[in-house]
Amino acid sequence: MTKTDSYDFDIAAPDAGAMIESLRAFGYDLPTSISDLIDNSIYAGAKNVWLKFYWNGENSTFSLKDDGCGMNEDELINAMRLGSRNPLEERDPEDLGRFGLGLKTASFSQCRRLTVATKSAGQNIAIRCWDIDQVVKTGEWRLLKITGKNADSYFSDLEKMENGTVVLWENIDRIVSGTRVDNGKDHRLFLERIDSVKYHLAMVFHRFLERGRLKIWINERTLEPWDPFLKNKKATQLLNEESLDITKKIVVNPYVLPHHSKIDDETHNYAAGPKGWNAQQGFYVYRKERLIVAGSWLGLGFKKEEHYKLARIQIDIPNSMDIQWEIDVRKSIARPPAFLRDDLKRIARLTREKAAEIYRHRGKIIARASASNFVFVWEKKVRHGKIFYSLNRQHPLIKEVLDNPDEYNPTIRALIRLIEETVPSPMIAMDNSENPDKQIKPFEKLPSNELVDVMTEVYKSLLASGLTVQDAQNRLAVMEPFYHYPELVVSFFESKQEI
């Protein structure tokens, strides 16, 4: 006997009611909770998953049915147990779970009554139910046993199937609490929630759907996959595939998607994804082809900016690296381990640069087409035989400020004259001759939003001066300092068109 075995102890079991209520706060939303249920169906070998949302106000229900291998009674009881497996155990490489919590926590996050009916080949239907209100009332972990005569009609399909499983959510308070069956607004919100599930599942399981490994039906309609990378389009660029770890189990495929001009409007709108083009840029982390993270720069120090929105990078990791990647219970967060961060940064920089090149090229084309309207901020002038520099009074932003008759106008005019009369020309000339390579260009190495903020105000001034949208954009493309950043100019124009 070891020393620790000799200690006296108390059994401090958690309060059942308090614990089960706490398990509702794992941070699932409706789409991520249903994704967790489908993970179980995939691991059970299901080829089809049927989702049914039934609207009935506060009595609305949700059910999932699959044609997987099902479970016998003992397996069902274990599956319904909280923490039914040790996350440290070695698992089947095809297993999409880890903590033994997904079915329960995902369901509890949305409903107060979870019933699972299942049937394996050659076995009778087994049914068990967690009723949160019963657990709170009794203070005990009472897993209710539902007999065939008390079974809901939702489970009748299992009688006709050789094997399969049905998950039923009742009292879905997190979805329909306070709603009325005859309220049109409540019904529309319910339908919007279904749409959010549809978009999420089309993205998370798109590789299963594309390869015919799985069909998902939502209220009897087949779900179509959403491919983030437009792999079937010729204009999509796949950069070099890389295997990053010594076991070659981590595979990275960087993609640069086509510019809007290379695809039709329908494809462009499709590729924008659930959150829009700008938000969907970044890394897409897959575990056994199941999407964990969609469109994130993974905390590697990169910002989501318009001119990088064509950059999307696919990462495939095995389920044996969940701990290193800090995969959470909801399977919605992943953080790259330290030994991969430098490689991922390098790949991200390359992909972002390739994406920006597309906008840079298009910006240069626009600038060449508008070169006759080139606009400078400063003008070179001669006074009494000597050179001096003056702000261009016809520059649209300067003109708008000076034409404004408000009380600050004299102060602004005085400030402009002070700036013009104190330009440190000798210092600039000396520094340029001594350190010609150290002269920084306007807005160089500054966050792009600082340039875009200025660009926005100049664009407004151009429109206020009476120019058409097209003429204003042509003028902006060749205006100092924006012509240095053609990729930002083009992405700025596109963002205005998408509003």
Image (cartoon, rainbow, N blue to C red):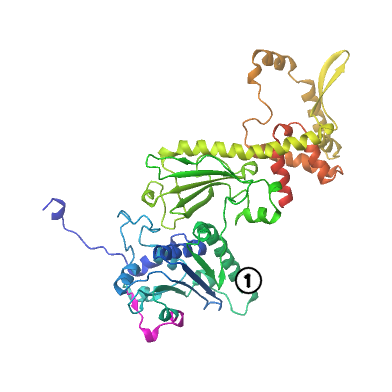
Decide whether residue 152 is among the magenta residues: yes
Q: Residue at x 57, y 54 (%)?
A: 227
Residue identified by numbered label 1? 188
How far across and down, in percent of the image, does residue 112 sit?
A: 44, 72
Q: Locate residue 85: give its quadrant.
A: bottom left
Classify residue 367 by image quadrant. top right
Q: Amino acid at mark 1?
A: Arg
Give the number of marks.
Answer: 1
Above or below, 415 against 93 in this view is above
Crowd around label 1: few <14 · some 14–19 · many ≥20 (10 Å): few
The image shows residue 477, relative to residue 312, as above or below, that is above
Magenta range is 142-156
> 403 or 251, which lies in front?
251
Q: Secondary structure at mark 1?
A: helix
Residue 477 appears anywhere in the view: no
Horizontal side of 441 relative to 63 (left or right) equals right
8 or 399: nearer the viewer: 399
Q: Position of residue 76 (x, y in %)?
A: 33, 71
Question: Which residue sits at x=41%, y=39%?
Answer: 338
Say whether residue 275 is left or right of residue 481: left
Q: Please, is residue 421 above or below residue 23 in the view?
A: above
9 in the magenta segment: no
Residue 139, given in percent of the width and then of the height, sits at: 32, 73
* Coordinates of residue 93 in the picture (x, y in percent): 36, 54
Left/right of residue 112 with respect to residue 268 in the rendered view: left
Q: Which residue is situated farthest in the left direction here? A: 1
Residue 485's place in the image compared with 186, above or below, is: above
Residue projecting furthest to the right: 384
Is residue 206 at all visible to an observer of this figure? Answer: yes
